[in-house]
Amino acid sequence: MIHNVSYWEIPSYIDLEGFLEKYPPDFKYKIDHFYFIIEYLAKGMEQGDLDQNLGFVNTSSVKLQSRIKNYNQYLNHMLEHRFIRTDMEYIPGLKSKGYLISGKNYDTITINLIPINSSVARRNRVKENKERIAKNKRTEKKYPYLTRWFNDKLKIDSRSAKLRLNELFPVQKGGIKGTVKGKPSRYAKRIKAIYAIEKFENKNFYYSVDDNVGRFHSNLTNIKKELRNYITYDGKRLVNIDIKNSQPFFSTLLFNPAFYKEKSEIINIYKIPSLIILYSSFSSFSSIIIMLGKTLESTDYELYMEYIEMVNSGDFYKLLHAKIYAELPYDKGKLKEIIFIVFFSNNRFIGQPEAQKKRDFREVFPDVYKLFALIKKKNHRALAHLLQRIESNIIIERVTKRISVEKPELPIFTIHDSVVTIQGSENYVSRIIEEEIKKATSLDVKLGLEFWNP
């Protein structure tokens, strides 16, 4: 992601000069400081998970203070006059305050380039650019078989993509209504999508591998799913081959005693050394493995079978719905939320009023829940970390690497649990995914195909 060193990239509905004229600050200010904060929040909306954080951007006080010593005065002035909003949620060591640019339901939002006046801000922008370029180059050196395809042949039909945004986030008639409780606003989602489209359009490609769970992040992973239909490579249509309910699928590996043995033929917990950091020390890591082994030995494997069979059916969420909420209309989003909470939340969360979905899962799968809770005993992030590490190891280190050797001229991209390639090559790529997963886990996977530009 390479910045334009001479300009701020600001959503078109922002009228900062008009705001400052109407509400002049009572402190000596630099307009570039305001623009820095606005761009920081806007790009944070583009890069972050809006649904998880309701559109708010968790700010870094270190980052802000490194650029603006009195940044709190700027934030407080914009908050006082409702130019921005805050979630007021600060958890020491876990979460900083979230901020969001206030907005309205505009027909169109584009990105305006505002000249940077401050020489210091321009120097900082040049420095950031160099750091990003260096980061891209490090990724290119380690994963050339993935980064080489981010070139001039990768294109988006930006006009059609922006028209699609009008269908996804239609302007509300009869006045501006409030956002749905628990959901990010439409304009926040539109901003996120516009930034992603314009990066594609300007060939502003970026990529990096997450040091935490090994996932490959890029323009493709960050663009809204519905907009991928307008992306092509060398004029060819693309197809996405994904692992059906990936994390529940890999979670079935955790019921195999071989997964906890250092010399097993399949991928095992010892091949994920980053877990040691989450468990604080090797002794904690070892004690958890011992407890997991004893739990598996003392539990009848049949008690896990219903969950495993449901996952392997290919219709996991529908079967989970029938198991838990048979009397209610099917809502896949609700079922995915259950799994997200079970996999990601702290064990102590189960007693909270908001944890009803987690308790629903525990009620129907008590032994499965017990094993998951044990993995998360020392650190609630351990289960999700484990599953994502397995996924990234297979997709990044095995599947795509093998394809790059066997068919070096076949374009391949990844979106976490899936591989994207040109249409017509889906059977070959599907076979490689199936074979590599079988070798790594001994599991039989079910795959889904999503044809872009159908």
Image (tube, rainbow, N blue to C red):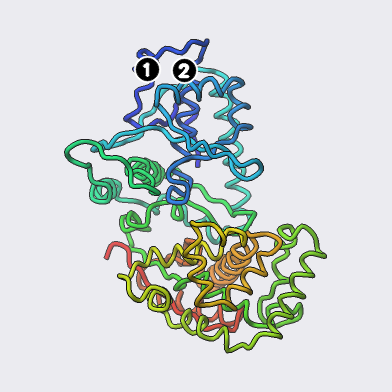
**382 or 365: which is nearer to us?**
365
301 left or right of 231? right
Query: What amino acid does circle 1 point to?
Result: Glu
Residue 17: give its label. 1
Please report the residue visible at 30 percent of the width from the left and 47 percent of the height from the top: 158
Please say if 189 is above or below 391: above
Which quadrant is the C terminus positioned in? bottom left
Mark nearer the N terminus (2 vs 1): 1
Please say if 227 is above or below 32: below
**350 or 194: which is nearer to us?**
350
Tag 1, which secondary structure? helix
Q: Is residue 389 visible?
A: yes
Tell me the quarter of the picture where residue 396 sits: bottom right
- The reply to whether the C-beta atoms of the residues labelled 2 and 1 are less than 8 Å apart is yes
Q: CA distance from mark 2 to mark 1?
A: 8 Å
342 left or right of 51? right
**Residue 38: x %, y % from top left:** 45, 29
Q: Is residue 201 visible?
A: no
**Residue 96: x %, y % from top left:** 58, 39
Query: What amino acid does circle 2 point to?
Result: Ile
Binning the other alpha carbons within 10 Å of mark 1 as few (below 14), some (14 to 19) or many (20 upward) gives: few
22 left or right of 126? left
**303 or 28: which is nearer to us?**
303
61 left or right of 412? right
- The residue under label 2 is 31
Please say if 414 is above or below 37: below
Tag 2, which secondary structure? helix
Binning the other alpha carbons within 10 Å of mark 2 as few (below 14), some (14 to 19) or many (20 upward) gives: some
